[in-house]
Amino acid sequence: MKILVIGAAPRSLINFRGALLEKIVERGHEVAASASGEVPIVTATLKDMGIRYHPIRLERAGMNPIKDIKTLLDMIRMIYRLEPDIVLSYTIKPVIYGGLSAPLCGVKAYYSLISGLGYIFTESRSLRKYFLGSMIRMLYRLSLKRSRKVFFQNPDDQALFLRKGLVQSTQAVLIKGSGVDIGHYGISPLPDEPVFLMIARLLADKGVREYVEAADKVKKRLPQTRFLLVGGLDPNPNAIRESELKKWQEAGIIEYLGYLDDVRHAIQMCRCYVLPSYYREGLPRSVLEAMSMGRPVITTDAAGCRETVILTREGQRQREQGDGVMRGENGYLVRTRDVVALANAMLQILEEPAMAKSMAIRGREIAEEIFDVHKVNKVLLKEMGLL
């Protein structure tokens, strides 16, 4: 069969869907991939995998109606020309415009993957966000109507879409995120140095400011502690400004490593990985990568993030009591936007090295048992009738 996979960012086709694309090709299907614009290394890598890349005009951020109409028309033309039997789309705009385009082009089977709800679905009293959210929910309802299956990466997103009537229960399938290649992200020894790491798009909702504020608190108590930050600046309206980033660097609070194609060396450098996000993640891949490499993690008790940490009985009791820090088998969950709780969790990692080591070991086990990319992809392939 002819299979078309549509995403937003070209690099995500390799970083997040590469193993899935390889598996589909291995099974003898003709595969094409599409995303916004063209990145030569992505096009070349896909070509080596036996996959043709088709760029389209698509802006991940913003809701410019003229540009989005051009995206829709580009997608219709591409799908009509390629005549795929199956289309799989992921991220907001590809899911919406793919879902509107595929039926018009006579596609036999359309599938959607909800990889997080993002900026528009985060809590806010903004009137603009309210209207944008209402419009996006309407577009989701229209585009997902003809989707055979809708894959969700966490139960909170699935419950929201069911509650709002955006999908039917017969469509919804829960998967364990994008999965992680446990061979590529191999376990490595914990360093002795007190180093924390955060990897994310530099958005406020990812918890970047909370990470920096907590880092400042920890450094006042333990000045030798280092805090690394990896990620690119973003056009999103809620992005961290470059001037703000420079201010943190000049104050000596963080060490900014920029955007990295390969984050493994950065993870090897840290004793603990931190993601204080309240962004409505699908299931954060960076946390899975850190777990796979044998790092304890600190993340938030928020949709998507909470799925990565298995709470101990003590942690469950702490959650019931409303504590800001909840102990897990492989790290900590902390209350969202709670800088004090985040700093306290970081201090516990540093002050209890034996516990941190046991969390690191357990994190790798959980990555192998639950989040192995091949196990996740097997569910996707089965549901799409490609096994």
Image (spheres, helix red, strand yellow):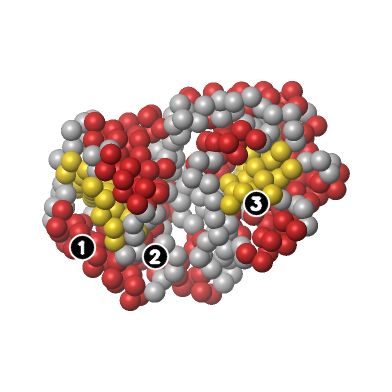
Q: Which residue is mark 2?
A: 59
Please tell me which residue is depicted at 65% across the width and 51% down the height of the picture: 256
Please tell me which residue is depicted at 60% across the width and 39% down the height of the picture: 266
Residue sitting nearer the eye, 366 or 71: 71
- Of labels 1 and 3, earlier in sequence is 1
Figure check: 350 above or below 246: above
- Of labels 3 and 2, earlier in sequence is 2
Instruction: Tell whether 202 sits left or right of 117.
Output: right
Residue sitting nearer the eye, 218 or 100: 218
Residue 171 — which label? none
Can see residue 133?
Answer: yes
**Percent position (x, y) of residue 240?**
61, 62
Element carrying mark 3: strand
Looking at the picture, which amino acid does disc 2 mark?
A: Glu
Q: Which residue is mark 1?
A: 76
Instruction: Tell whether 349 sits left or right of 185.
Output: right
**Percent position (x, y) of residue 275?**
61, 46
For the C terminus, give its image quadrant: top left
Element carrying mark 1: helix
Q: Which residue is mark 3?
A: 256
Binning the other alpha carbons within 10 Å of mark 3 as few (below 14), some (14 to 19) or many (20 upward) gives some
**Percent position (x, y) of residue 249?**
72, 56
Figure check: 218 above or below 355: below
Can see residue 112?
Answer: no
Figure check: 297 above or below 339: above
Looking at the picture, which amino acid does disc 1 mark?
A: Ile
Please tell me which residue is depicted at 26% across the width and 43% down the height of the picture: 47
- Of labels 2 and 1, earlier in sequence is 2
